Image (cartoon, rainbow, N blue to C red):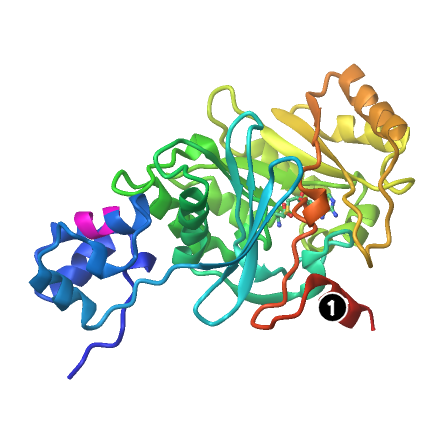
């Protein structure tokens, strides 16, 4: 009787040891296999030359090492590179390499599409197609690191691509553990930032994780009325409760929670909004990252001009808030925040997809 096919790329080191053990293979070979896949980016078992031929044959009989396939690779004038990656079921996501910020950064996706439906985000228009597996999330980092020659270097990871990481909690945390392993890319939690709309029960779980990434919370509005309109999960997890959960969130020494705030012209960028924001964040170890809207077809908001952005930032600074304004990268190739959209499993372009959505 043959075993069902299994996928080593989906397993943490301990699981891989057990899986090999169950197939009569010495568990210490797990480290070799893990190193090939996650550290060297090699997923063809025939190329794993420090495993004996007999062992390679034994492993190969009933396993497939999956890896995302690069089906698109576009470079922006600013050096940003947007990759379109395809999984074994032909679903696709976009993952972005952002160089020199000053670190090298990979922005990866956690879902195909997204269920959160934020009013200014193109990915939100797709709805949720499916969660990514842990191997698919970790695989994006491995494939981008290989493509950019950074497998042996340190880099940052931001979970700010498509999807809501806390809506795919277990797979996301497992992916971070796979990436963290010494036999893999050995990514330190300090180099990982998880960005979320603020799903409170998941935030409470995150607070107890041994692997604790930096936290970014997408705030975007200062009243429940406005936030519920822009970020629908706010109806379930209102501002006061969200900020309370943030206040209680265990922070490492010298670390702060980043609050992301997308600036929509004449909607949430007035001086009153800036003052309310400063008041809300009072007493939270925080910094604010302002994101002037990256416009996209079908998104019913405008990007404020620089004067409005400056006015908003200045009020926060005067109120003692730590502020940065995100320089938008990769806009010419639609790789900027909220501009990632692909139709899973089909060959439609983003423009065709938008046209369908707007019909
Ligand atoms: N689901 C996670 C990660 C999403 S993307 C979250 O919501 O935090 C990372 C950031 O880009 C979020 O703050 C998101 O709100 C923001 N964003 C989405 N669309 C945008 C747009 N069109 N312009 C600027 N920022 C946008």
299 with respect to 238 (left or right): right
In the rendered view, tell whether residue 334 sits above or below residue 150.
below
In the rendered view, tell whether residue 51 sits above or below residue 131.
above
Look at the numbered disc 1 and give the secondary structure of its residue: helix
Residue nearest the viewer, comparing 334 with 221: 334
Q: Quadrant of residue 308?
A: top right
Which residue, as the protein is rendered here, is positioned at the far right? 266
* Magenta-drawn stretch, dominant element (helix, strand or loop): helix
Which residue, as the protein is rendered here, is positioned at the far bottom? 1
Q: Which residues are magenta?
A: 31-35
Image coordinates for residue 24, horizontal then vertical, percent:
8, 65
Image coordinates for residue 353, horizontal then vertical, percent:
72, 68
Q: Quadrant of residue 125?
A: bottom right
319 with respect to 304 (left or right): left
Instruction: State the quadrant of the C terminus.
Output: bottom right
Image coordinates for residue 67, horizontal then vertical, percent:
38, 59
Mark 1 neighbour class, 10 Å CA radius: few under 14, some 14 to 19, many 20 or more: few
* Residue 34 on the magenta segment: yes
| Residue under the image location 33 percent in, 59 percent down | 10
* Residue 29 on the magenta segment: no
Residue 238 seen by the camera: no
91 with respect to 349 (left or right): left
| Residue under the image location 20 percent in, 68 percent down | 60
Instruction: State the quadrant of the N terminus.
Output: bottom left
In the rendered view, tell whether residue 207 sits above or below residue 22.
above
Q: Quadrant of residue 94?
A: bottom right
Which residue is the site of mark 1?
352
Image coordinates for residue 335, horizontal then vertical, percent:
65, 47
Residue nearest the viewer, comparing 348 with 92: 348
């Amino acid at each position: 009787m043959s075993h069902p096919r299994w996928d080593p790329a989906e397993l943490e080191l301990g699981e891989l040891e057990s899986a090999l053990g169950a197939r009569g293979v010495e568990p210490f070979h797990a480290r070799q296999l893990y190193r090939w896949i996650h550290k060297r980016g090699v997923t063809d078992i025939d190329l794993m030359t420090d495993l004996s031929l007999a062992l390679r044959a034994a492993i190969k009989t009933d396993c497939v090492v999956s890896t995302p396939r690069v089906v698109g690779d576009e470079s922006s004038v600013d050096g940003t590179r947007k990759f379109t990656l395809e999984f074994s079921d032909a679903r696709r996501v976009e993952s972005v390499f952002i160089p020199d910020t000053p670190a090298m950064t990979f922005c990866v996706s956690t879902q195909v599409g997204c269920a959160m439906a934020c009013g200014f985000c193109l990915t939100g228009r797709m709805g949720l197609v499916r969660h990514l597996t842990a191997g698919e999330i970790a695989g994006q980092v491995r494939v981008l690191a290989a493509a950019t020659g950074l497998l042996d270097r340190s880099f940052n990871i931001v979970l700010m691509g498509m999807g809501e990481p806390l809506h795919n909690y277990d797979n996301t945390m497992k992916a971070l553990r796979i990436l963290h392993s010494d036999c893999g890319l050995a990514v330190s939690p300090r180099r990982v930032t998880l960005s979320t709309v603020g799903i409170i029960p998941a935030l409470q779980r995150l607070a107890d994780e041994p692997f604790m990434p930096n936290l970014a919370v997408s705030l975007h509005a200062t009243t429940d009325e406005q936030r519920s309109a822009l970020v629908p999960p706010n109806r379930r997890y209102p501002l006061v409760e969200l900020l309370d959960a943030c206040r209680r969130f265990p922070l490492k020494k010298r670390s702060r929670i980043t609050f992301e705030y997308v600036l929509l012209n004449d909607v949430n960028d007035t001086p009153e909004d800036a003052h309310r924001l400063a008041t809300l964040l009072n007493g939270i170890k925080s910094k604010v990252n302002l994101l002037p809207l990256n416009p996209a077809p079908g998104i019913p908001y405008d990007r404020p001009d620089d004067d409005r952005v400056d006015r908003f930032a200045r009020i926060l600074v005067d109120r003692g808030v730590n502020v940065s304004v995100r320089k938008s990268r990769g806009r010419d190739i639609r790789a900027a925040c909220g501009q990632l959209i692909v139709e899973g499993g089909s060959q439609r372009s983003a423009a065709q997809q938008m046209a369908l959505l707007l019909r």
